[in-house]
Image (tube, grey):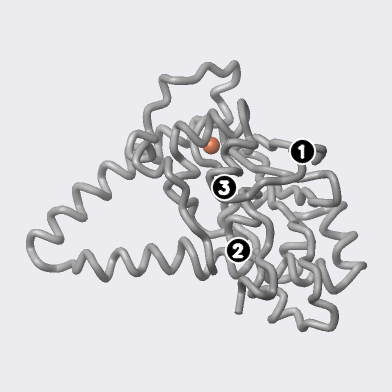
Amino acid sequence: MHDDDPPFIPDARRSHDHDDHDHDDHDHHRHDGDVSHIEARVRALEEILTQKGYVDLAALDRLVETYERRIGPRNGAHVIARAWTDPDYCERLRTDATRAIAELGYSGRQGEHMIAVFNAPGIHNLVVCTLCSCYPWPVLGLPPVWYKSAPYRSRAVIDPRSVLAEFGFLPALDTQIRVWDSTAEIRYLVVPERPPATEGWSEDQLASLVTRNSMIGVSPALSPEAAS
Ligand code: FE
């Protein structure tokens, strides 16, 4: 996976401050308070275990990195590559994403109600959770730090093009940017456009072009040259 992180990473450390938004329905996000509480406990535990020498922090980082960037997004990449190569599967993904994704063996917490949004000429989709960090775990793994950051959560809605530009992605000016706000109930998966010059490619080859960021919608899929 070739995902680059954007410049607003430093702000992500403040991502659990929820006072900077107002929203008329907090119920569907009630889980987030629990997550913060759990995270605080996990951090305290981590510190004690590290101090006592039971846990190697570098190993822990590698483990998180694996789940963030490799295992999770690979599942999503499999889904996208199948949709690119199998028109019937693509149609099932369009009409009932939860079921189509489960067909490939990916289901579970934070992926119970999936919707696939398809990029097309003139249409680009971008996913955010404006309140916290709702994210489709079964297909994308853990959310990247920037996804949870306050700047991303607000700017993705207010000025999506500037966010995309920070990822080095400049869609044509007449391309419509559709922004999808995830909730605890509904999670979105962006289906990027299949890169040109990939005719005859196998599903595995195609999956190698599908990055985590392209499935959030902050980047297109890799071109064959970029991937090699
Ligand atoms: Fe959320």
Q: How many discs appear?
A: 3
- Place of residue 57 in the rendered image (x, y in percent of width and height, measured from the top left): 21, 64
Residue that appears at 69% across and 36% down: 179
**Between 109 and 150, which is closer to the camera in this rendering?**
150
Image depth: mark 2 or mark 1 in front: 1
- Place of residue 17 in the rendered image (x, y in percent of width and height, measured from the top left): 37, 28
Q: In the picture, which quadrant includes the C terminus?
A: bottom right
- Identified by mark 1, the residue type is Leu
Q: As displayed, is residue 62 above or below residue 25? A: below
> Quick check: is the Cβ at mark 2 less than 8 Å away from ligand 1?
no
Q: Earlier in the sequence, mark 2 or mark 3?
A: 3
Q: As displayed, is residue 217 above or below residue 52? A: above
Taking 179 as reference, is 162 left or right?
Answer: left
Residue bearing mark 2:
211
**Between 184 and 168, which is closer to the camera in this rendering?**
168
> Quick check: is the Cβ at mark 3 less than 8 Å away from ligand 1?
yes
Residue that appears at 43% across and 69% down: 66
**Residue 203 occupies which quadrant of the picture?**
bottom right
Residue 173: mark? 1
Residue 105 can be seen, yes or no: no
Taking 6 as reference, is 13 left or right?
Answer: left
Residue 12: mark? none
Q: As displayed, is residue 91 above or below residue 154? A: below
Q: CA distance from mark 2 to mark 3?
A: 15 Å
Crowding around mark 1 (Cα neighbors within 10 Å: few <14, some 14 to 19, many 20+) is few
Image depth: mark 1 or mark 3 in front: 1
Q: Are marks 2 and 1 in contact (CB under 8 Å)?
A: no
Helix, strand or loop status at disc 3: loop
Residue bearing mark 3:
135
